[in-house]
Amino acid sequence: MQTTRPALDLSTTIPGTMMDVPLTIHWIFQHAVNNHGAREVVTRLDDGSYFRYTYADFGKRVAQLAHALVELGVKPGDRVASFGWNSHRHLELYYAVPMIGAVLHTVNIRLFPEQVCWVLQHAGDKICFVDGSLVPAVARAMAVRSDVPMEFVVMGPTTTELPGARDYEELLAGQPETFDWPDLDERTAAILCYTSATTGDPKGVMFTHRSTVLHAYAAGLADGLAVTQRDVILPVVPQFHVNAWGVPFLAPMIGAKLVMPGSGMDPASLIDMVDREKVTLALGVPTVWLAVRDELVRRDTTLPTLKALVIGGSAVPPSLYDDLEAKGTRVIHAWGMTEMSPIGTAAAMHSDLEDATPRERRAALLKQGRFSPLVAWKVLDDEGKPVPRDGVTAGALWVRGPAVTGSYYRLDAELPVFEDGWFHTGDVCTIDELGYLQLVDRSKDLVKSGGEWISSVDLENELMGHPAVREAAVIGLPHEKWIERPVAVVALREGQSVDEPGLQAWIGERVAKWQIPDRVVFVDAIPRTGVGKFLKRELRERYKDLLSE
Ligand code: AMP
């Protein structure tokens, strides 16, 4: 990770001040092992059984893994890939890899084979740790590109053989249970995560030890995710997507029990986990909780232990908020971005709302929330002037802070999203007098379906490659199950014809099935802005009910 901060000149500091101790992940690790050694980490395995151990056991295995990594030749600064669900083994990688000075690259298991190869190569990974059940996905990726040299370590049982792969448990067996951890600068790179781009290739965000520790501190505050040692936390948000929103650091830091869902992301498995392990706090995108809500309604039951649900990644649908609150579960609406580690805001109550009507309170808590103390913000109009903080006037949101990225990994181009030490989020928002952020639009044209990004630009390019299509705009429209689904608005060339299924089939040959637009609408011409860009805002408004009709 590049940094412009000069080394501290100790000769000029005033004697008698605090110890100069780097903020590294080792702090969280040592604290969990030494002070919360008896607290449990539980993983639901693929066969539906549960594996459990304590933070003390975790500590020993992290040391064993560190020895194994060194034996495999991993050196400080090397990138090590993981391709896995949320599990205790993935948690071990989260600590052992950065604590020896290397970088854990968490690969999104939902990428296409070509994209998997692209990120592995861009990151410069030499070793990839893969869950047994995901070996087929990795094998498909490797079949695409035989020129990406990679050693594999398989975690847990698998039915598919990966030639030459090592077994995780065999690597750890017999290794010493302690490790002489190196002293690291707090600015050392720790974890690398790629985010989807509007156009072009994914972009790498590199978290440092310092940003990771600070983010965990801020996220855990009472007006943040409000985590205590008594909590039992279920991160349904994946470890391959922005560090499961920081929970793998936050829970051990506080000594909370951690429940890892593995591949059991369906509503029945999640309800089973909450019930059995007495989960008090769970986190994930709205799609997951909509499905859980429907299953609870079908069974006519509640989850009495579940005190709070953190929902983010997309806006919380008001009906979901109401249903969960009615079942006694507090909804904490949160907003963030990969580039922000990711949590930027959380919707906790403000003192001024204490005497407000329930309706006013609900309206405020349905917004994306109030800012983390480590995130500075500004909201600018088209001319770059700050907009009034009135909860009505919208503008472009810029942020800055110690857990906000200052650049993308190995991308030297000067990007307009970074300016004068600020990062342009691409979100359009209002901020009210109490400090609640509300997103009103997205300036980047991505569609977010069930927590996964779909590039509208990629789909438009494919559609416009069809001989009958003159122009095409793809927009995300509200969808009950997936929150948003892509819809294509298409104008045809004169004298040419193609119908909706025909275009869906054309696209289906070119992108993953889940990215095919749900509908194709034909128009004479697509409305445009003054500078000739498609007026997607108008299209979104015009067709807003299309998918619910
Ligand atoms: P990612 O980097 O994949 O986590 O996506 C970040 C983007 O997701 C943000 O810039 C927003 O556009 C969107 N997003 C995240 N949280 C929310 C939320 N609570 N409500 C609406 N959009 C959100």
Image (cartoon, grey):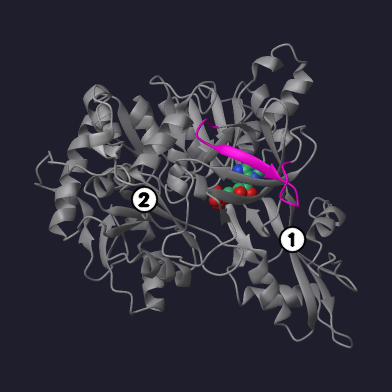
Q: Identify the residue at horizontal 79%, vertical 76% (top origin).
A: 471
In front of the other: label 2 or label 1? 2
Mark 2 — residue?
A: 191
Task: State the image coordinates of residue 505 (x, y, percent, origin top left).
Answer: 69, 76
User: Can the viewer see residue 46 in this picture?
Assistant: no
Mark 1 — residue?
A: 475
Task: State the image coordinates of residue 142 (x, y, percent, origin top left).
Answer: 36, 73
Q: Residues within 10 Å of mark 2 (few under 14, many from 20)?
A: many
Q: Residues within 10 Å of mark 1 (few under 14, many from 20)?
A: many
Task: Say whether disc 2 or disc 1 marks the residue closer to the N-terminus.
Answer: 2
Q: Identify the residue at horizontal 31%, vertical 64% (top origin).
A: 125
What's under tag 1, amino acid-wise?
Answer: Ile
Task: State the image coordinates of residue 85 (x, y, percent, origin top left).
Answer: 40, 49
Image quadrant of residue 80? bottom left
Q: Which secondary structure, mark 2?
A: strand
Q: Is the distance from the Cβ of mark 1 to the nearest ligand 1 atom less than 8 Å?
A: no
Image quadrant of residue 229? top left
- Label count reads 2
Tell me: 17 left or right of 546: left
Cα distance in 3D space between marks 2 and 1:
32 Å
Span of residues in magenta: 372-386
Q: Nearer the viewer, residue 36 or 223?
A: 223
**Is 384 a magenta residue?**
yes
**Is 283 a magenta residue?**
no
* Quarter of the N terminus within the rendering: bottom left
Main structural element of the magenta stretch: helix, strand or loop? loop
Work out which residue is located at the far front of the displayed protein and give it.
12
